Amino acid sequence: MRRAVCPGSFDPVTLGHIDIFQRAAAIFDELIVSVFFNPGKEKAMFSVEDRVEMLKKATAHIPNVKVTSFSGLLNEFCAREKVPFIVRGLRAFTDFEYEFQRALLIKSIDNNLETVFIMTNAKYSFVSSSGVRELATFGGCLKDLVPPCIEEHVSKHVSSKI
Ligand code: ADP
């Protein structure tokens, strides 16, 4: 059975992420989508529990996706879960530089781990969690950026903070 992990902040999950999950889930038998967090560094809009809940809702239509969270090093997660593939999405040149370094670092730690990149869908190439957070903070429309169930969740969250 071919298993892969798609790690990320997902703060919150966007249509760009969902597109990557759907395509990766068609390649692998099981895709673990995992919210990675560093307790010392986190300055997120949503709690890890909230992000996991949103991911579960937004991926309910993809049967071979499992959602978890993890605090620690990615290679440790992969060893623990016995997952040899890491899936990352790629948008622009700026993603490439970061992802290139990250993939090589992981490879230097564990040569058995392979990072697999899936190119963004042109429709979502401009979509980012940070853009969603910024728009949401100022009451902008999130319709084309996140799934409908997430749009509602984000709007409620933002209005509860005002
Ligand atoms: P991280 O903080 O680890 O970069 P993100 O939640 O921002 O986590 O992103 C998780 C993964 O999804 C990354 O590989 C990122 O490049 C990818 N990604 C984010 N937005 C998009 C998008 N619109 N299209 C394709 N891939 C994306």
Image (spheres, helix red, strand yellow):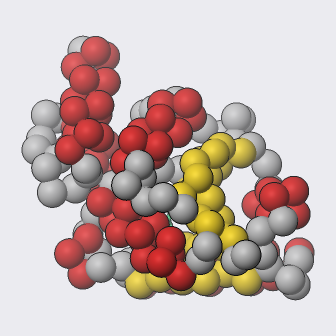
Where residue 45 appears, as percent x and y from the top left, is: 43, 34
Drawn side of residue 7 relative to residue 21, left or right? right
Q: Is residue 75 in view?
A: no
Frontmost residue, 87 versus 157? 87
Frontmost residue, 71 versus 105? 71
Q: Residue at x 41, y 84 (%)?
A: 119
Where 72 sits versus 79, above or below?
Answer: above
Where residue 63 appears, as percent x and y from the top left, is: 48, 58
Where residue 78 appears, as percent x and y from the top left, is: 80, 64
Q: Residue at x 45, y 45 (%)?
A: 55
Drawn side of residue 77 relative to residue 110, left or right? left
Where 94 sits versus 71, above or below?
Answer: below
Where residue 107 appears, as percent x and y from the top left, is: 81, 82
Q: Quadrant of residue 15?
A: bottom left
Number of numbered labels in the structure image:
0
Q: Residue at x 22, y 55 (%)?
A: 145
Q: Quadrant of the C terminus?
A: top left
Where 112 sits versus 87, above or below?
Answer: below
Q: Residue at x 57, y 34 (%)?
A: 48
Frontmost residue, 91 versus 27? 27
Q: Quadrant of the N terminus?
A: bottom right
Q: Quadrant of residue 156?
A: top left
Q: Quadrant of residue 127?
A: bottom left
Q: Is residue 132 in view?
A: yes
